[in-house]
């Protein structure tokens, strides 16, 4: 192999690795700091995973030490998460890719009030942030979560 061919192969390899890294950053899979609506401070860590094209989110940590033992006391009586610890709880379920950087069709549970909302996530800022939209019909709210490196 000539020197030019070797350099070309190395350049292709580097480009392939760079494209893989970019694709990974444009996936919601990873760990995210959720941000409190009122204080604008980190509230919890949620790990988003993917299985068979469907994404899920599980609470890994609650930032406030006084809330470490929080349970979903307000969950509906027929919800298996009722009375269970929030840490380790799957709160985001059933989202599927809907378009470029958008996943929807799932649900998100707010363990504080026990309500379940339609969920949609959109990656923004090159995959560094995630807009989490929870809604019922046309009413809802959007939070911005920040990726943990």
Image (cartoon, rainbow, N blue to C red):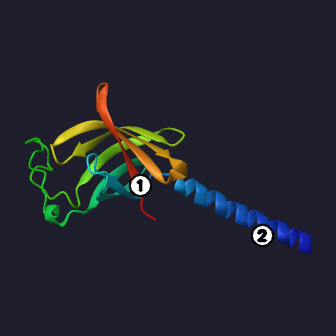
Decide which of 74, 4 is in the foreground and name it.
74
- Marks 1 and 2, the one that precedes in the sequence: 2
Q: Write down the quadrant of residue 132 in the picture.
A: top left
At x 23%, y 44%, the residue is 109
Give residue 101's position: percent from left, percent from top: 51, 43
Q: Residues within 10 Å of mark 1 (few under 14, many from 20)?
A: many
Farthest residue toward the front? 39
> Quick check: 15 left or right of 82?
right
Q: Helix, strand or loop at disc 1?
A: strand
Farthest residue toward the top? 138
Label 1 sits on residue:
146
Marking on residue 79: none
Is 104 placed above or below 111 here?
Answer: above
Decide which of 147, 54 is in the foreground and name it.
147
At x 11%, y 49%, the residue is 82
Label 2 sits on residue:
10
Query: Which part of the image, by quadrant, shows the N terminus?
Result: bottom right
At x 41%, y 55%, the residue is 146
Give residue 70's position: percent from left, percent from top: 13, 58
Label 1 vs label 2, nearer the camera? 1
Q: Write down the quadrant of residue 14 in the picture.
A: bottom right
């Amino acid at each position: 192999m000539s020197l030019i061919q070797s350099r070309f192969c190395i350049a292709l390899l580097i480009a392939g690795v760079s494209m893989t890294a970019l694709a990974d950053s444009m996936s919601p899979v990873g760990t995210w700091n959720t941000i409190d609506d009122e204080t604008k401070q980190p509230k919890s860590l949620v790990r988003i995973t993917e299985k068979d094209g469907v994404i899920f989110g599980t609470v890994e940590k609650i930032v406030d030490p006084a809330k470490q033992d929080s349970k979903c006391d307000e969950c509906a009586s027929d919800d298996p998460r009722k009375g269970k610890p929030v840490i380790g709880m799957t709160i985001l379920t059933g989202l599927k890719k809907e378009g470029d950087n958008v996943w929807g069709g799932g649900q998100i549970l707010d363990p504080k009030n026990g309500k379940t909302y339609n969920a949609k996530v959109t990656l923004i800022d090159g995959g560094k942030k995630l807009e989490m939209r929870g809604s019922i019909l046309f009413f809802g709210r959007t939070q911005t979560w920040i990726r943990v490196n």
